[in-house]
Image (cartoon, rainbow, N blue to C red):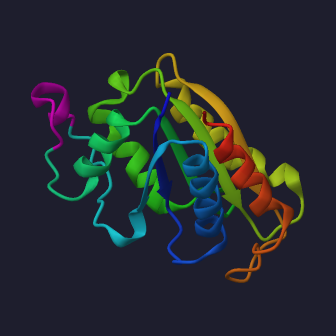
């Protein structure tokens, strides 16, 4: 059965290393027969959550920007791929802002499969612990959802250097597994 796969690329660099992994994952997921959509949130206007909690009363965020469109797509997806470059051993600000904005729906963001695609310049793989903790903290709030897989590409700094590495193959293979 075909799944609705949503890939959220948070890299501020179009064609950056995590963005390339998104494209490889998309290729594999399409080959598996899925409907695949990719969003580059760096191309969107997504403000940060102000903690006003108006959404808890109205069911809608008080901030009028592109976040609601992404959130609607997240709700409709069976599979959500969160991709981020690692900045200061955490996820990038663009992805964190979007995650914080899901406070409007997170109790309803349930029973999803989540995949993570992370890239960093550092070669100490233990440095992925911080970004993975951030992503898993979000997942813990999505009832019945599961971490289905990840690619953590280390030693990739310059834009595009991930091309031709085993990390790209791993991302495509992960996408193929979304059957």
Q: Residue at x 39, y 51 (%)?
A: 98
Viewer-side residue, 134 vs 69: 69
Question: Compared with residue 91, is residue 42 higher up or lower down, i.e. above or below?
Answer: below
Q: Which residues are magenta?
A: 53-61
Image: 171 above or below 45:
above
Give the x, y percent position of residue 164: 81, 73
Q: Residue at x 89, y 64 (%)?
A: 123
| Magenta stretch holds residue 10 | no
Residue 53 placement, left or right of 173: left
Work out which residue is located at the far right of the displayed protein and give it. Answer: 124
Foreground: 93 or 84? 84
- Residue drawn at 21 percent across, 40 percent down: 52
Where does residue 4 sit, x and y in percent of width and height? 43, 38
Q: Give the left or right position of residue 55, taking residue 139 as reference.
A: left
* Relative vertical location of residue 71 with respect to residue 169 in this rendering, above or below: above
Q: Is residue 173 above or below residue 9?
A: above
Q: Quadrant of residue 108?
A: top left
């Amino acid at each position: 059965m075909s799944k609705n796969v949503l890939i959220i690329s948070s890299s501020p660099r179009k064609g950056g290393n995590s963005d390339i992994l998104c494209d490889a994952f998309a290729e594999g997921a399409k080959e598996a027969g899925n409907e695949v959509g990719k969003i580059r949130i760096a191309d969107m206007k997504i403000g940060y959550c102000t903690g006003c909690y108006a959404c808890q009363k109205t069911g809608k965020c008080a901030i009028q920007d592109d976040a609601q469109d992404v959130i609607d797509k997240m709700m409709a997806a069976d599979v959500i791929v969160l991709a981020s470059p690692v900045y200061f051993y955490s996820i990038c600000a663009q992805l964190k802002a979007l995650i914080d904005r899901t406070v409007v729906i997170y109790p309803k963001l349930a029973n999803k499969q989540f995949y993570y695609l992370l890239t960093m310049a550092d070669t100490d793989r233990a440095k992925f612990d911080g970004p993975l903790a951030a992503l898993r903290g979000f997942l813990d709030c999505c009832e019945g959802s599961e971490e289905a897989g990840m690619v953590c590409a280390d030693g990739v700094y310059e834009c595009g250097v991930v091309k031709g590495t085993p990390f790209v193959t791993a991302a495509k293979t992960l996408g193929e597994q979304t059957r």
